[in-house]
Image: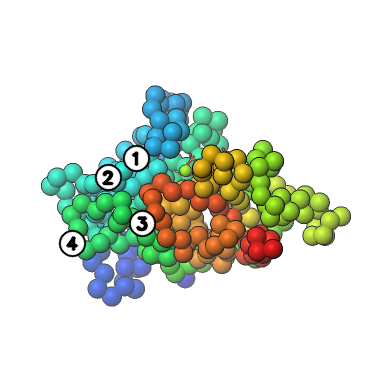
Amino acid sequence: MYQIGTTLTQYIIEEQHTYEGASGHFTGLLNDIATACKKLSGLTRKGALVGVLGAASSENVQGEIQKKMDIISNDVFIEALENNGHVAALASEEMETVYNLKEGKRRGGYLVTFDPLDGSSNMDVNVSVGTIFSVVKAPKGVLNPTAEDFLLPGTKQVAAGYCLYGPSTIMVITTGRGVSMFTLDNSCGEFILTRDDVKIPEDTKEFAINTSNQRHWEAPIQRYIQECVAGKEGVRGKDFNMRWVASMVAEVHRILSRGGIFMYPLDEKMRKSGKEGKLRLLYEANPMSMVIEQAGGLASTGRERILEMQPYALHQRVPVVLGSKNEVQRVIDYHLL
Ligand code: AHM
Ligand code: MG
């Protein structure tokens, strides 16, 4: 446990001391991620004043129209991470293939995957967006890692987290020893520890799912939501509340703050179009699952633990059910029937 008020810089230096033989690269890398997030915090706050709202004239590898901020935030991340010799390669939602460092740049021992601006459709309507990141060790002695090198199960992550650009800018980090939450103090430009050892309540009365897809859901999800909506009069014997921000970072942050369950399940419409889910395994589901599990929650596809899945592609999609332990377990149980 760290003292509330500790700066992120102090925290990552202290974390380094807990690893024997640590070289300082991990510390440097987390620092670079924090720098990128601070820049993005500034840009998202300025919005229309600096001309970053609206669509770009390009599509990403998933065939989605990119927002200007998708491209800008991807560039901000690359710039912050490629110059200091801590990473070997990068991969992101906004790039089709692995980003290998330019000739002459120092190579480090880590691979970073990231969604530079998740929920970016919210930018234009001034609703919370966020950055999600995942860190794994790079294979030793490989100069230019390939996509194959990134295809590791989430259990191999050495750090993961997100930065939420909301009323406050909040960085949430886990290095596998619990979850810590830092709030950006703009007066000194530092992230300050505002909650440590975050734990998610095991029970909840709040669910998050895009109900416009209801007619496509599979039976276990239909049953779970119907029982929530039936409230006090139904089998659950209590009223539930519903929230949907359309920004996974904001949903996960709410769940860390007061409990809840978030679902983006596989449905019949996706099945018919050959999709395996909406959210991406390597830079959305895995890092968020690590954060949720480290805070005492569960993260599953409904059928298996997300963190144990063996990825086969960089942009692979996956069904996601995560949050308060007892509710996620109930959804898993309904899938077993
Ligand atoms: P994005 O990475 O293209 O922004 O999409 C991911 C987002 C999540 O943040 C959010 O949970 C989901 O897409 C919202 O989907 P929908 O538009 O179907 O409500
Ligand atoms: Mg995303």
> Which quadrant is home to the C terminus?
bottom right
Q: Is mark 4 within 8 Å of ligand 2?
A: no
The secondary structure type at the circle numbered 1 is loop
Query: Which residue, given by chain and number where applicable, does mark 2 sit on?
Result: 99
Query: Which residue, given by chain and number where applicable, does mark 4 sit on?
Result: 141
The secondary structure type at the circle numbered 3 is loop
The one of 156 and 269 positioned closer to us in this rendering: 269
Alpha carbon distance from label 1 to label 4: 24 Å
Q: In this orientation, does residue 46 appear?
A: no
Front of the two marks 2 and 3:
3
Alpha carbon distance from label 3 to label 1: 16 Å
Q: Residue sitting at 18 percent across and 44 percent down?
A: 102
What's the amino acid at mark 4? Gly
Q: Residue sitting at 45 percent across and 56 percent down?
A: 287
Sort mark 3 into few (<14), some (14-19) or many (20+) by Cα contacts within 10 Å.
Answer: some
Query: Which residue, given by chain and number where applicable, does mark 3 sit on?
Result: 151
